[in-house]
Amino acid sequence: MEAVQFRDAEAVVRTYLLNYMGAVAMGTKLPETLPAQFLKVVRTGGTNETLISDRAQITLEAYATKEVDAVALLSTARAWLNAADGMIFGVTELSGPVNLPDPITSNIRYTMTLWVRIRGVVITG
């Protein structure tokens, strides 16, 4: 018997972006000490779209010490995701980049939300 398992969408997106963006600090939670630039990748919803694809809603939050750097970081991640064609495909933007300072810390933050399709992996049992 075969089944299709969907991978952790946050991990898939982070791994993909790290392959193209190099040593950018990235994670699903803010570190205690925020580096000069940080990209937060969080799954904020979504459903399996078909038997073989998961449509994950991903929110990206780019933090930096200057607005110009935060928007540049987010813009780079956006470009690489829009170019995806492999494990990640069919990226659709739900909300483009928005200047939305962190309400708790007032840190500079640009954010956007996308749907990313992620191919499932066949497992046997």
Image: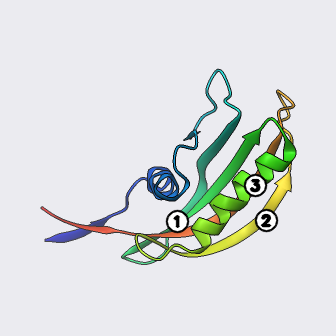
Q: Nearer the viewer, mark 2 or mark 1?
A: 2
Label 1 belongs to which residue?
47
Crowding at mark 3 (Cα within 10 Å: few <14, some 14-19, many 20+): some
Residue most extreme to the front: 22
Crowding at mark 1 (Cα within 10 Å: few <14, some 14-19, many 20+): few
For the rendered model, the colour scheme is rainbow
Image coords of residue 74 (percent x, y): 71, 55
Q: Nearer the viewer, mark 3 or mark 1?
A: 3
Circle 2: residue type: Gly
Q: Which SS class for mark 1? A: strand
Image coords of residue 75 (percent x, y): 72, 61
| Residue in the picture at 44% in, 56% down | 12
Image coords of residue 33 (percent x, y): 66, 21
| Residue nearer the viewer, 50 or 74 | 74
Q: Which SS class for mark 2? A: strand
Crowding at mark 2 (Cα within 10 Å: few <14, some 14-19, many 20+): few
Measured in 3D between alpha carbons, the distance from the residue under mark 2 to the one under mark 1, in whole angstroms, is 21 Å
> Mark number for residue 72?
3
Of the image marks 3 and 1, the number of the one nearer the N terminus: 1
Of the image marks 2 and 3, the number of the one nearer the N terminus: 3
Numbered-mark total? 3
**Is the residue 16 above or below the residue 61 in the image?**
below
Instruction: Work out which quarter of the rendered image holds the C terminus and state it.
Output: bottom left
Q: Tell me, yes or no, whether the two marked residues, 2 and 3, touch with CB atoms within 8 Å.
A: no
Label 2 belongs to which residue?
96
Instruction: Work out which quarter of the rendered image holds the N terminus and state it.
Output: bottom left
> Mark number for residue 13?
none
| Residue in the picture at 18% in, 71% down | 2
